[in-house]
Image: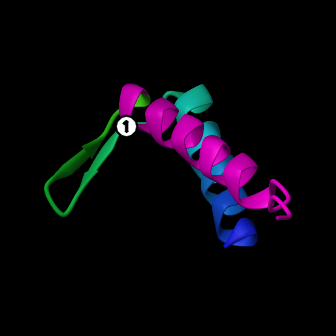
Amino acid sequence: MSGFAANQILTHGALALGGVEFELFGILYSRRLNTTAAIFWAIALVVRMRPAKSS
């Protein structure tokens, strides 16, 4: 999961920074969508990597 999340951060982040926009399967991958996706996956990665609380 962590590797996949890191890949998504890099991919969406690069597309957002590059301003690349395209449509695939009816979804418009705009700069805003890629920025949002990169932020989402970064949060998911941080939550996933956080150590579990011990009881």
Q: Residue 1's x, y, as percent? A: 66, 73
Q: Secondary structure at mark 1?
A: loop
Q: Which residue sits at x=13%, y=55%?
A: 26
Q: Residue 53's x, y, as percent? A: 81, 58
Main SS, magenta region, reads: helix
The crowd level at tag 1 (other Cα within 10 Å; few <14, some 14-19, many 20+) is: some
Q: Which residues are magenta?
A: 32-55
Q: Which residue sits at x=50%, y=31%?
A: 35
What colour scheme does the image use?
A: rainbow
Q: Taking 21 as reference, is 49 left or right? A: right
Q: Residue 3's x, y, as percent? A: 75, 70
The one of 44 and 14 positioned closer to us in this rendering: 44
Q: Residue furthest front?
A: 55
Q: Residue furthest left?
A: 26
Query: Eyeballing the image, is 24 above or below 4?
Result: above
The one of 19 and 41 positioned closer to us in this rendering: 41
Q: Quadrant of residue 39?
A: top right
Q: Which residue sits at x=39%, y=26%?
A: 32
Q: Taking 42 as reference, is 29 left or right? A: left
Does 42 lie within the magenta span?
A: yes
Query: Eyeballing the image, is 50 above or below 34?
Result: below
Q: Taking 52 as reference, is 37 left or right? A: left
Q: Quadrant of residue 31?
A: top left
Does 33 lie within the magenta span?
A: yes
Disc 1 target residue: 21
